[in-house]
Image: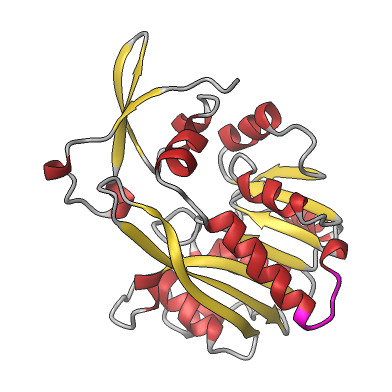
Amino acid sequence: MKKRHRIQFPKTELTNINQDEAYFYLQGSGGKRKIRFHDYDEIYQVEGLYEQIFYDRLKCASPSKVASILESAIKQYQDNFTELRILDLGAGNGMMGEELKKHGVSRLIGVDIIPEAYDATLRDRPGLYDAYYVEDFTKLDDDKKEEIISWQCDCLVTVAALGFGDIPAKAFIEAFNIIKSEAWVAFNIKDTFFDISDESGFSKMIRELIFSKYLDVYYIERYRHRLSIEGKPLYYFAVTGWKTSDVPDDFLESKGIIG
């Protein structure tokens, strides 16, 4: 039986804050502790806390949505989903990896920047990944890069980790180039990041990549990612595409994007 944690969201009249600034209180033996939603290192250290907040309370649907549109696109083009070798960027504690395994993927390689994510995966989902790397993809050394390349991944997925500074644009492009030169890509992104008025580096990078010759978009769907702490729906886009070639080193700079 899963342990249930005593969590409390702030009063609704106090929650007029940005999505990346949302927080909750965790009640424990040492008293009440305030934790931001994006303080993943703290959340992952408490078994079952991530799932209780984002999946039980806030009804996050992104892993199942992104996995399903990826599978649909692959079936449409008569490829075999179960033969995929997937690089799961921003793997966290393995929620997306677990969803992909339900679909029977061949190989699953996890990557995250924080060691607490790796520790949580070992604790909660041992054996899920064929390999799991704790690496900063903006500072990946050549030996480690070659090791990850040797897995010959032909699909990149990243879920609920893009934007808000979780994965920098440069790190996403690095992962994009590590998978095979022709490969599947699936990710989700907050709907406002597609707004041309959003001049953030990550938003510009996603728009430029989608309209570039390096990625052919096969499927895009707006859906409810999860609820906010006020119970309002937060909408994202789920995107599946086909990588046609590596992105050149100067791509971000040439588009005026700070990675």
The spot of residue 27 in percent (x, y) is 33, 18
Q: Give the farthest residue toward the left.
A: 13
The spot of residue 23 in percent (x, y) is 30, 39
- Looking at the rendered image, the quarter that the N terminus falls into is top right
Picture quadrant where residue 210 is located? bottom right
Position of 131 compared to 94: left or right?
Answer: right
Q: Give the farthest residue toward the front.
A: 1
Position of 149 compared to 188: left or right?
Answer: right
Residue drawn at (66%, 30%), measured in percent from left and top? Answer: 124
The spot of residue 113 in percent (x, y) is 57, 45
Q: Is residue 177 visible?
A: no
The spot of residue 91 in percent (x, y) is 62, 48
Picture quadrant where residue 134 is located? top right
Q: Which one is nearer the viewer's eye here, 112 or 230?
A: 230
Whether residue 234 is situated above or below residue 228 in the rendered picture = below
Whether residue 20 is situated above or below residue 220 in the rendered picture = above
Picture quadrant where residue 94 is located? top right
Colour scheme employed for the rendering of this structure: secondary structure
Residue drawn at (45%, 48%), measured in percent from left and top? Answer: 59
Q: Is residue 132 magenta?
A: no
The magenta segment: 76-80
Q: Is residue 200 visible?
A: yes
Whether residue 184 is situated above or below residue 61 in the rendered picture = below
Whether residue 29 is situated above or below residue 172 in the rendered picture = above
